[in-house]
Image (cartoon, rainbow, N blue to C red):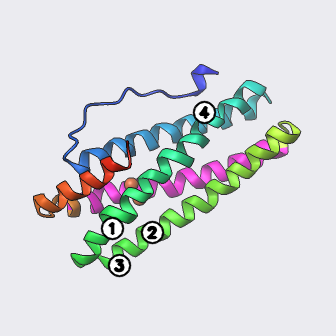
Amino acid sequence: MSELVTLRTRPRVDLDDPISLLEEDHGRIEAQLASLEGIVAALARELSPSASRALSVPLHFFRMDGLRHVRDEELSVFPRLRSAGHASLVEALIDEHRQANLIFQSMRTVSTHMSLGGVTHDLVQELGVHARAHAEVTHEHVQREKTVLLPLLRALPGAEKRAVAKEMMARRV
Ligand SMILES: [Fe+2]
Ligand SMILES: [Fe+2]
């Protein structure tokens, strides 16, 4: 099971810098997408109970850390960028969060069916459809944030950035 789960050591981040915190999260999100893809591929080859149990790791990550990342952005970053004149970008990114979450909930439902009734080829196929859609939406979203959102956040005054980082750190205690 261990080979199905991608582990990353936490790099050092500047705790006063919200951009490094968000970049660190994006790296972990990408790593968990890769884990999920590997688990789905393993299940497609063989209906292994260990692979289906391994699913709980990325699903837990997206349910907890992924949701915290969304809260960091929607509660601390986006309001400041909306005030700075970037409302349409913010609305588009929020819409992408909603899309990814809807697909994620479908994956959780399939995983619950697997836990309750066993792993079947039909469930693995359904999981694969949701996992690919979730990965596609999330990869594109993270890419857009890297190229458009983070440069706008970087351009905010230092006091604003420190306030964002302080709010983010308060969600990590
Ligand atoms: Fe986001
Ligand atoms: Fe993000």
Query: Which of labels 3 and 1 is toward the front?
Result: 1
Q: Residue at x 42, y 39 (%)?
A: 28
Q: Residue at x 76, y 48 (%)?
A: 110
Tell me the magenta residue range.
122-151
Q: In the rendered image of this protein, does residue 61 appear above or below residue 132?
A: above
Q: In the rendered image of this protein, does residue 100 appear above or below residue 172?
A: below
Helix or strand or loop: what does disc 2 sit on? helix
**In this picture, residue 90 sits left or right of residue 105:** left
- CA separation in Å, label 2 and label 3: 10 Å
Q: In the rendered image of this protein, does residue 23 appear above or below residue 92?
A: above
Mark 3 or mark 2, which is nearer the start of the sequence?
Answer: 3
Task: Say which amino acid is labelled 4.
Answer: Gly
**In this picture, residue 118 sits left or right of residue 49:** right
Across and down, in percent, residue 29 comes to 45, 44
Mark 2 or mark 1, which is nearer the start of the sequence?
Answer: 1
Helix or strand or loop: what does disc 3 sit on? helix
Q: Neighbour class for label 2 at 10 Å: few (<14), some, many (≥20)?
A: some
- CA separation in Å, label 4 and label 3: 35 Å
Marks 2 and 1: in contact by CB < 8 Å? yes
Q: Neighbour class for label 1 at 10 Å: few (<14), some, many (≥20)?
A: many
Q: Does the numbered disc 4 mark a residue whose Cβ is under 8 Å from ligand 2?
A: no
Mark 4 or mark 1, which is nearer the start of the sequence?
Answer: 4
Mark 3 or mark 4, which is nearer the start of the sequence?
Answer: 4
**In this picture, residue 170 sits left or right of residue 6:** left
The prevailing secondary structure element of the residues shown in magenta is helix
Q: Spot the residue most to the top.
A: 2
- CA separation in Å, label 1 and label 4: 33 Å
Q: Which mark is residue 78?
A: 1
Circle 3 residue: 88
Circle 4 residue: 38
**Image quarter (top left, top right, bottom left or bottom right) of the N terminus:** top right
- CA separation in Å, label 2 and label 4: 28 Å
